[in-house]
Image (tube, grey):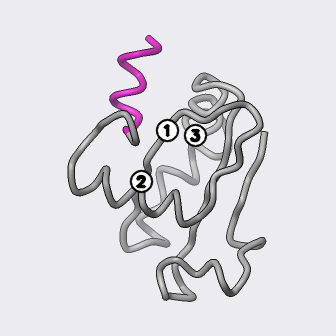
Amino acid sequence: MWRHGIDTRAPDEDVYGDPLMTVNLSVWQSVEHLKNYVYRGFHRDVFRRRKEWFDSSAVVLWWVEPQERPTLQEGKRRLDEYVEHGPSDTGFGFREVSSLTD
């Protein structure tokens, strides 16, 4: 539905202070649409090889209202909370959302 990727990041949105940090923030129509994108087709093959290009990667998911467009600052805050405290109402991973949707 919407994507805020590295190609659209303004200098004042450098939430990590590192120009080499790749950030991707997107809003999906459904969890099923996101899972199909990540785990099927061309992107699946790229996703499996991510360690060839990145030192590390992390993902956090959260629910948004249909017209909501999160900011990079919000994404960073939610990822930091998820990494530090684990899944909650403010952020969770594919494992947690899969148990809700399977």
Whole-percent x, y for residue 80 in the image: 34, 61
Residue kind at label 1, given as amino acid type? Trp
Q: Are marks 3 and 1 in contact (CB under 8 Å)?
A: no
Q: Residue at x 51, y 57 (%)?
A: 75
How many angstroms separate mark 3 from mark 1 (CA)? 16 Å
Q: How many marks?
A: 3
**Residue 24 lies within the magenta run:** no
Residue 39, compared with residue 78, is above or below; it is above
Residue 73, compared with residue 11, is above or below; it is above
Which residue carries the number 1 mark? 62
Residue 94, compared with residue 30, is above or below; it is below
Residue 101, compared with residue 67, is above or below; it is above
* Label annotation for residue 92: none
Tell me the crowding category of disc 3: few under 14, some 14 to 19, or many 20 or more residues within 10 angstroms, Cα based. Answer: some
Whole-percent x, y for residue 36 in the image: 62, 29
Residue kind at label 3, given as amino acid type? Val
Q: Residue at x 56, y 72 (%)?
A: 22
**Residue 99 lies within the magenta run:** yes
Q: Is residue 45 left or right of residue 90?
A: right
Q: Earlier in the sequence, mark 2 or mark 1?
A: 1
Q: Is residue 57 left or right of residue 68?
A: left
Which mark is in front, 3 or 2? Answer: 2
* Label annotation for residue 78: 2
Q: Residue at x 71, y 75 (%)?
A: 9
Extent of the magenta region: 92-102
Tell me the crowding category of disc 1: few under 14, some 14 to 19, or many 20 or more residues within 10 angstroms, Cα based. Answer: some
Q: Residue at x 41, y 34 (%)?
A: 94
Which residue carries the number 3 mark? 38
Q: Is residue 96 left or right of residue 31?
A: left
Residue kind at label 2, given as amino acid type? Arg
